[in-house]
Amino acid sequence: MARNGADFGIRVAGLGDRWFVAPVNTPDGLFFPGFGPADANPDLGDSAIVETIGLGGMAMAASPAVARFVGAGGLDEALRVTDEMREITLAEHPHFRIPTQDDRGAPLGIDVRKVVETGITPLINTGIAGRRAGTGQIGAGVVRAPLGGFVAALEALAALRATAEAARPGSSGVVAPLRPA
């Protein structure tokens, strides 16, 4: 996952180097003195990559203090967010354990099928950059990945599967829809 202040993109295993993009969202959070939501730039930077390995928004329950710092509430909200991220992932990290959740592993392996089916998109912990060039960081917050890139990726996976099924000897050409496991 990556974002550049205009677009949010994902790359998906099995689909090569193709990026699936949608317009990026603007973060919500806590602002430094003198700044507010109107000063925020749409999300950008490289911090979204940590969610793909089970950190950041995926593991909010591991650090309720960070949840409060980014304006996402305290312990109860951090627990809720991490539980919500489990709904769109395939596994738990074997090493990144969360003591506030009985030592379970952080949610890991974002599944585009589950994202599209539930409508739940990854929550990203992020710094908030100023809209005006040269301002730099004006706060810290959270932002949701836009759904559009996940929908496009799932459509590409379905097309790839249909093509592979149609090419299989003896195939009827009928392909069952992709559904989360």
Image (tube, rainbow, N blue to C red):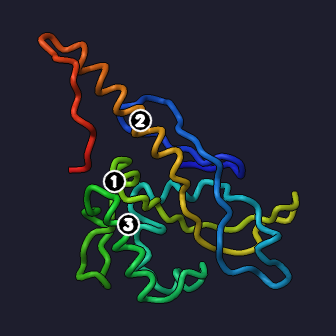
The amino acid type of the residue labelled 2 equals Glu
Q: CA distance from mark 2 to mark 1?
A: 13 Å
Three-letter code, disc 1: Lys
* Total marks placed: 3
Callout 3: SS: helix
Which residue does the image show at 53% across and 36% down from the upper left?
Answer: 19
Mark 2 or 1 closer to N-term? 1
Q: Are marks 1 and 3 in contact (CB under 8 Å)?
A: no
82 left or right of 127 in image: left
Query: Mark 2 sits on what residue?
Result: 155
Query: Which element is circle 1 on?
Result: helix
Instruction: Give the spatial CA distance, label 2 vs label 3.
Output: 22 Å
Mark 2 or mark 3: which comes first in sequence?
Answer: 3
Left or right: 97 in relation to 67? left
Along the viewing direction, whichever of 119 and 72 lies nearer the viewer? 119
Q: Which residue is mark 3?
A: 85
Name the quadrant containing residue 157: top left
Q: Which residue is mark 1?
A: 114
Q: Position of residue 131 (x, y in %)?
A: 82, 62
Q: Tell me what residue is drawn at x 71 percent, y 75 percent.
A: 139
Q: Which sits in the foreground, 97 or 21? A: 21
* 10 Å crowding of disc 2: few (<14), some (14-19), many (20+): some
N-terminal label among 1 and 3: 3
The amino acid marked with disc number 3 is: Met
**Rendered view: 16 above or below 109:** above
Residues packed near mark 1 inside 10 Å, few (<14), some (14 to 19) or many (20 plus): many
In the displayed structure, does residue 49 sit left or right of residue 129? left
